[in-house]
């Protein structure tokens, strides 16, 4: 008696991906359409996984060069929130293990909210160390957004529980830090470490803005995250500003 298609499907679902080839051999001569579809589906999944593994290896070019030069703890650092009208600028620093290969890491802007949240949990679990830097709207107004971003990056790096040997930063050279560093243009899409930092910075800031939305519901921060959406701008014109608005960003909109 042949194995039912539903049982074969369950067998594939429970099989570790590295052993799937054995099931291809086991059921390769089964001519039932349902079994053929299962096998084709898993062949596509394996192909997609191979492509993703290659992409991840390409994201480790900078890290591998540094490992070969003798550096051990490489921190990626990135910021989120330079452009919004409200809320803090948030940076994250992440040191990943040398053998780390977290599938799916990418520039946080290219990922869905669901995927970012999934990766956030994996990254903070696997990281050697991670930390955040948060600069408020008031301080952004006081020192300007660029200096606030530098300060947040410096704070997050200095808060790491493991001191980095080298820092890979997205796009910038961070002033006044003690660590050797390299700025990489579009680094969140070119370095695994920076990509990981971009994800946990983005998730952290989004969650902060969702909490702020409970205090200031009229601005709908849970949706716009402080960015200048039409709805947000209309709310500013109607209600004025709240304590987390950046006054220096609003001079062209209202009198502040």
Image: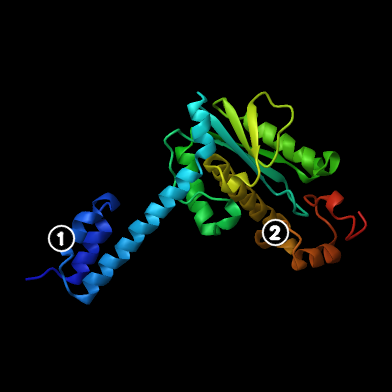
- Whole-percent x, y for residue 35 in the image: 22, 70
Q: Which mark is residue 26?
A: 1
Answer few, some or many: residues within 10 Å of disc 2's Cα (few below 14, many 20 plus, some between 14 and 19): many
Which colouring convention does the figure follow? rainbow
- Whole-percent x, y for residue 4 in the image: 16, 71
Tag count in the figure? 2
Q: Where is residue 21, by image quadrant?
A: bottom left
Out of 6 and 25, give the one closest to the viewer. 25
Out of 64 and 122, give the one closest to the viewer. 64
Residue located beneath label 2 in the image: 221
Image depth: mark 2 or mark 1 in front: 1
- Vertical arrangement, residue 43 with respect to residue 117, above or below: below
Does residue 133 appear to the left or right of 138 in the view shown?
A: left
- Vertical arrangement, residue 66 with respect to residue 254, above or below: above
Q: Residue lying farthest left?
A: 1
- Vertical arrangement, residue 256 with respect to residue 77, above or below: below
- Vertical arrangement, residue 181 with respect to residue 144, above or below: above
Going 84% across and 66% down the picture, which residue do you hit?
Answer: 238
């Amino acid at each position: 008696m042949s194995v039912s298609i539903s049982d074969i499907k369950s067998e594939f679902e429970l099989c570790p991906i590295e052993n799937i080839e054995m099931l291809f051999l086991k059921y390769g001569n089964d001519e039932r359409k349902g079994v053929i579809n299962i096998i084709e589906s898993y062949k596509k999944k394996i192909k997609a996984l191979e492509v993703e593994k290659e992409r991840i290896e390409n994201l480790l070019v900078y890290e591998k060069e540094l490992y070969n030069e003798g550096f051990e703890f490489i921190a990626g650092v990135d910021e989120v929130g330079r452009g919004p009208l409200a809320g803090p600028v948030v940076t994250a620093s992440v040191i990943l293990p040398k053998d780390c290969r977290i599938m799916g890491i990418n520039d946080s802007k290219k990922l869905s909210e669901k995927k970012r949240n999934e990766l956030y949990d994996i990254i903070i679990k696997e990281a050697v160390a991670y930390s955040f830097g948060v600069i408020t709207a008031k301080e952004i107004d006081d020192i300007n957004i660029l200096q606030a971003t530098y300060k947040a990056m410096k704070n997050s790096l200095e808060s790491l529980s493991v001191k980095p040997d080298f820092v890979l930063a997205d796009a910038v050279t961070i002033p006044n830090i003690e660590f050797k560093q390299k700025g990489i243009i579009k680094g969140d899409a070119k370095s695994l470490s920076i990509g990981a930092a971009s994800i946990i910075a983005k998730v952290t800031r989004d969650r902060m803005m969702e909490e702020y939305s409970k205090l200031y519901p009229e601005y709908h921060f849970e949706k716009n995250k402080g960015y200048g959406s039409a709805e947000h701008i209309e709310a500013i014109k109607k209600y004025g500003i709240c304590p987390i608005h950046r006054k220096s960003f609003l001079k062209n909109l209202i009198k502040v």
